[in-house]
Amino acid sequence: MLNIVIFGGPGSGKGTQSEFIKKKYSLDHISTGDVLRAEIKKGSELGQMCSDIISKGQLIPDDLMIKILAKQFDSFENSNGVIFDGFPRTIAQATALNDILIERGTKVAGVVALEVEEQELIARLIKRGQISGRSDDNEETIAKRLHVYNNQTSPLIEFYKNEGLYKGIEGMGTMEEIFNRICVAIDSL
Ligand code: B4P
């Protein structure tokens, strides 16, 4: 299986590039952000719990996210591989992902990390907020999400560098230019 983690700050283009990658390489796609937003829309118990956390720019507790992730992964049949988009976001999640995949006889093949300047992240998310209606795409929450990313998620860069899996991708430029860089990295795996 070709299991790819797509990694980067909020608004770095993980969701955007995952759509291109899944088509080209015929992969399944798990976006934890999309899963949570769907639960909020349904008004489920999980959705009600997460709604407040997301609009404050914080992270959902690890144990809950890990259960959701394992369930989603097990729902795929005859998969060529999976793009993990928005997961892991903490060291605990990264360790759990390794365990989940090892238990199922597979592993992370590579980590595609979109490297984008902070000012550009803010500009993209503010622009998206004007049309998305997302409760977390406003200036105050964007600042909190960046703070959470810098404190809780960015340590994963070292984690995956140590595992020899990190593929840094220049994440500035057109969506097509970035996708071409990602393909070079995936083809080298
Ligand atoms: P996510 O949905 O993962 O949010 P994101 O980081 O903002 O998305 P992404 O990086 O995919 O941005 P996109 O491609 O859309 O998570 C939302 C929240 O859910 C989190 O804050 C957290 O609370 C919770 N959550 C999710 N997963 C969790 C986990 N594992 N553990 C705990 N909590 C979790 O791009 C953004 C914008 O930029 C788009 O409008 C796009 O059109 C534009 N764009 C993309 N590429 C561009 C380019 N090259 N040039 C110009 N614009 C571009």
Image: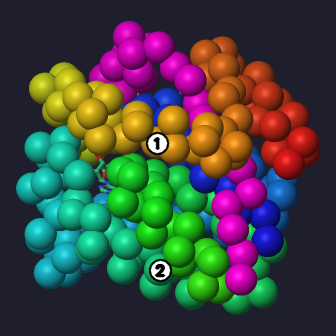
The three-letter amino acid code for the residue at tag 1 is: Leu
User: Which segment is the magenta one?
Assistant: 105-126
* 137 in relation to 36, above or below: above
Picture coordinates of residue 78 (x, y %)?
Answer: 77, 86
Q: Quadrant of the N terminus?
A: bottom right
Rendered residue at 46%/63% (across/down): 95
- Relative to residue 75, is residue 177 drawn left or right? right
- Relative to residue 49, is residue 63 drawn left or right? right
Evaluate whether residue 34 shows in this view. Answer: no
Indicate the quadrant where residue 9 lies.
Answer: top left
At label 2, counting other C-alpha atoms closer than 10 Å, the crowd grade (few under 14, some 14-19, many 20 or more) is some
Mark sitting on residue 156: 1
Residue for badge 2: 70
At label 1, counting other C-alpha atoms closer than 10 Å, the crowd grade (few under 14, some 14-19, many 20 or more) is some
Rendered residue at 47%/58% (across/down): 94
Mark sitting on residue 170: none
Task: Choose between 158 and 130: the one closer to the eye.
Answer: 158
Disc 2 residue lies near ligand 1 with CB under 8 A: no
Task: Choose between 53 and 98: the one closer to the eye.
Answer: 98
Q: CA distance from mark 2 to mark 1?
A: 20 Å
